[in-house]
Image (tube, helix red, strand yellow):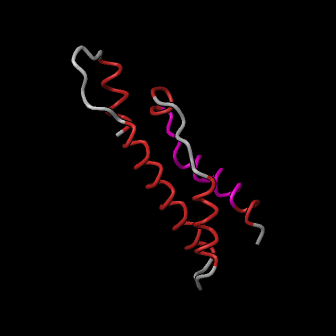
Amino acid sequence: MDVSKYSKELYDHIMSTARHPFLSRHLKEPALDMDKLKLLILILQRLDINQKVRRQSITAAMLVQTALELHDEVREFAPGEDEKMLRDRQLTV
């Protein structure tokens, strides 16, 4: 299996899964760490699991990782914060 080609395919799949019209209006597109994605592909490639389970596992792990990274960027409530900023922060979490 060509890891570069497969990682690009999975990247597109994960990003399409993470997109939602409402969230896209209020938040920037999340970043996906390609190094982590390729490492996960290489690790799971060695396991005796079928392709569908491997793809689902990688997708789930990368979505969770992306959510954790987004969560780390969310700051605490700031006095005087306007409603849009508050909504954006809440949507991020």
Q: Which residue appears farthest toward the bottom when viewing the image?
A: 48
Q: Which residue does the image show at 37% across and 27% down from the upper left?
A: 88
Q: Which residue does the image show at 59% across and 85% down from the upper left?
A: 48
- Frontmost residue, 21 versus 49: 49
User: Residue 2: percent from the left, percent from the top?
Assistant: 78, 67
Question: Above or below — where is 41 with respect to 93?
Answer: below
Q: Which residue does the image show at 61% across and 79% down from the upper left?
A: 50
User: Residue 83: percent from the left, percent from the top?
Assistant: 29, 18
Question: Above or below — where is 68 with respect to 90?
Answer: below
In this rendering, position of residue 41 left or right of residue 77: right
Q: Which residues are magenta?
A: 7-21
User: Residue 28: percent from the left, percent from the top?
Assistant: 51, 31
Which quarter of the rendered picture does the C terminus lie within?
Answer: top left
Q: Magenta includes 20?
A: yes
Q: Main secondary structure of the magenta part?
A: helix
In this rendering, position of residue 47 left or right of residue 71: right
Question: Above or below — where is 36 with respect to 85?
Answer: below
User: Residue 54: percent from the left, percent from the top?
Assistant: 58, 72
- Frontmost residue, 67 versus 21: 67
Q: Which residue does the image show at 21% across and 18% down from the upper left?
A: 79
In this rendering, position of residue 80 left or right of residue 19: left
Question: Above or below — where is 90 with respect to 56?
Answer: above
Q: Magenta includes 26?
A: no
